[in-house]
């Protein structure tokens, strides 16, 4: 279980650079189904599909400026059983802290908030890090890696549902337009009807 949790939580730090681009572009508003949810691609051009599996969707944005990369993702993964939503969310925060690669990433800021999103109890997070890759955190060469997203307790109590927009560049801020696209990407995620009904049955 810990290995599975580690693999998926680590995506928030390595996703922008670790997966190859597929050759096919994605049309705006393309619908993809993953387990228990339907995800729509951003309503704009220049996005490509990196991964579409039963529990995950990963899209990448192509920039004219090749020094920039951006990822929009949604995925579900097992995160253990917890008596309450608050215990689940605390576990997620603790795991994210433990799994940070301190040899590669210098964490500048982390903001975590407990929120309700789509009627799910969620951890809303924003992070800013220096990504030194394999050069070590003492190296003066790095890119800024920013993430903005949610990790929610899915109505199947042991499942985490994470969706995120991330950006890697020489700038500390995620571009405002990319943030807007990301929030729209989050808002248009649709849970299946049985999932919505089950929301009322868990503590």
Image (cartoon, rainbow, N blue to C red):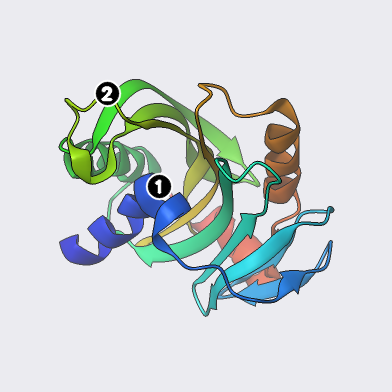
Residue 140 in view (yes/no):
yes
Q: Residue 189's spot in the image, x, y percent?
A: 70, 57
Q: Please tell me the numbered disc located at residue 12.
A: 1
Residue 156 in view (yes/no):
no
Q: Residue 180's spot in the image, x, y percent?
A: 75, 35
**Of callouts 2 and 1, which one flags the residue occurring earlier in the amino acid sequence?**
1
Decide: is 141 above or below 150.
Answer: above
Residue located at (83% from left, 63% from top)? 29
The residue lying toward the viewer, choosing from 154 and 19, is 19
On the image, numbered disc 2 is attached to which residue?
140
Kindly give the residue lying farthest to the bottom in the view shown: 54
Residue located at (35% from left, 40% from top)? 89
The residue lying toward the viewer, choosing from 140 and 21, is 140
Secondary structure, mark 1, is: helix
Residue located at (32% from left, 46% from top)? 88
The residue lying toward the viewer, choosing from 53 and 103, is 103
In space, the residues marked 2 and 1 are separated at their CA atoms by: 23 Å
């Amino acid at each position: 279980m810990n290995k599975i949790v580690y693999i998926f939580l680590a995506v928030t730090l390595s996703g922008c650079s670790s997966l190859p681009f597929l050759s096919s572009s994605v049309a705006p508003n393309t619908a993809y189904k993953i387990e228990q949810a339907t995800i729509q691609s951003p309503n704009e051009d220049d996005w490509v599909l990196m991964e579409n599996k039963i529990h995950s969707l990963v899209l990448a944005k192509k920039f004219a400026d090749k020094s920039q990369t951006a990822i929009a993702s949604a995925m579900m993964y097992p995160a253990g059983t917890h008596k309450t939503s608050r215990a689940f969310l605390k576990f997620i925060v603790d795991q994210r802290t433990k799994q940070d690669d301190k040899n590669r990433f210098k964490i500048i800021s982390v903001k975590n908030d407990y929120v309700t999103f789509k009627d799910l109890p969620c951890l809303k997070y924003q992070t800013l890090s220096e990504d030194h890759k394999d050069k070590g955190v003492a190296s003066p060469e790095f890119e800024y890696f920013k993430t903005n997203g949610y990790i929610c307790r899915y109505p199947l109590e042991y499942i985490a549902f994470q969706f995120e927009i991330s950006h890697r560049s020489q700038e500390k801020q995620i571009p405002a337009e990319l943030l807007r696209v990301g929030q729209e990407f989050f808002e248009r995620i649709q849970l299946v009807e049985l999932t919505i009904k089950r929301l009322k049955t868990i503590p």
